[in-house]
Each structure stands twice: as C-alpha cells, then as structure tokens.
Amino acid sequence: MKKILFVLAAVLLVATAQAKKVKVTIDGRVSPSQTKLYLIINEDTVNAQLLPIKDAKFSVTVKVDKNSFIRLHDYKDWPERSVFVLIPDSKHITIDWNTGTITGSNQSRELQAICKQIRDAGPNGFHIDVFSDDPEAWRQARIREASIREDMMNQQKKIAKEVMLENKNKIYGAWIMYTFPELLEGELNAIINYEKPKWADHPILKAK
C-alpha cells in the first residue's frame, strides 16, 4: 500500500512539474545590421541560445516554466539594459527591435514599461553644465547637481517599491531585484518578510 501511495505521489509530482511548463513561439524583426541575438532563460548565460537571423527576422519555439524570464539581447551581459525581457503568458509573442514593441504578451509589455520608467527616472548621465571660470559657480553647480541626482534616485526607489507592493502575485519584482538591486537596500528584507510576495522565491534570485 505504501508503495502504491509513493508511486501515486511521484506521478502527481511529475504531473505538477509538467503543468508548470509552457510552449511559446517567439518571433520578430531585428535591425538589418544585427548579426547576433541571444535567447537567455532566467539569466542562465552559460546556456544562452544563439538564434539564427535571416532577412532581419527570427523565430524560435521554446518550452519553459510559466514564470520564466526570457531575455532577447545582442549581448549576454547587461540585463538591466535589455528592452526585450519576456514573460511567457501566451503561446505566441512577437517583438520589433526597430520600434521596441512587444505584441502578444500583456505581462511582457507591463514589465517593459516598468523598467523604462525606472531607467528614465534615474540620474544616469545627468549633469549640470557650467559656462564660467568662477570656482564658486562650479561649486554651487555641483551641489545642485548632487541634490537633483539624489531626488532622481529617490524617485527610482519609489517606483520600484510601488511595483513590488502592487504586484505581489506577479514576478515583476524579481526582475527589478535582479537588475536594480541598489534601489531597495535596507527596505527589501522588510518587504519580503511582511508582504511575502510570490516573486521572492523566483529562481533568478537564487542563482544571483
């Protein structure tokens, strides 16, 4: 009897594991000059798949966990810069590299918009030009610049925190944690311990 129960439990476990897998076809257009396009699942860059490109088009079908992050990028590195990070919430997703658009996946579009909002709010590259030889003018400009950059970083943190708290049952928070870990230093443990979001257990965070 115990043996039968064990077998049934094993079958149920396998069935549950299989139920989490989904098959998705991803296709689209890339830049005419683009020669490389990697498909990276949950940031496993060691096993990144180099996709064939013909006439600036590509197509691939993969079977992945339904909560996977599928990154399409011409580099294996710099996930925080990637425009196309897909969540397989449908059977067919199409991207256009030239317009930056994603069709066929609502969650992928939402994540894309969130990441753009966080990047745009940040201080990267921001500076104040000073057209003067006066040292005091330079000093005042640098003080003002530092203040504005701090305000920008605080806005980034606000956006990230709101996304994490408002989407506890989606996996957006896991990608934000992975690509922008500095945004919630000091607050992240409190969010995880008190809110207990599902994204906190995402495989991408365990591999980091």
Image: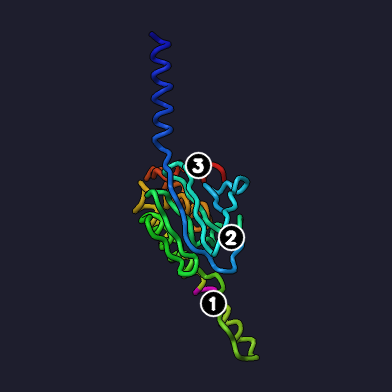
In the displayed structure, 26 sits above or below 97; it is: above
Q: Is the N terminus in the top left, top right, bottom left or bottom right quadrant?
A: top left
Magenta range: 144-148
Give how far across and how far down residue 52 sits, in percent.
Answer: 58, 55
For label 3, the residue is: 203
Q: Residue furthest front?
A: 55
Label 2: which secondary element = loop
Mark before the other along the chain sequence, 3 or 2: 2
Q: Residues within 10 Å of mark 2 (few under 14, many from 20)?
A: some
Q: Residue furthest top?
A: 1
Measure the C-alpha gap from mark 2 to mark 1: 34 Å
Q: Which residue is pictured at 54% across the width and 73% down the height?
A: 146
Give how far across and how far down residue 118 sits, in percent.
Answer: 45, 64
User: Given contact means CB atoms under 8 Å apart, are the residues at marks 2 and 1 in contact?
Assistant: no
Q: Which residue is pictured at 39% across the width and 48% down the height?
A: 91
* Quarter of the figure with residue 116: bottom left
The amino acid on which the numbered mark 1 sits, given as a three-letter code, is Glu
Label 1: which secondary element = helix
Is label 3 or label 1 in front? Answer: 3
Q: Which residue is pictured at 65% across the width and 91% down the height?
A: 133
For label 1, the residue is: 145
For label 2, the residue is: 74
In the displayed structure, 22 sits above or below 36; it is: above
Give how far across and how far down residue 87 sits, in percent.
Answer: 43, 51
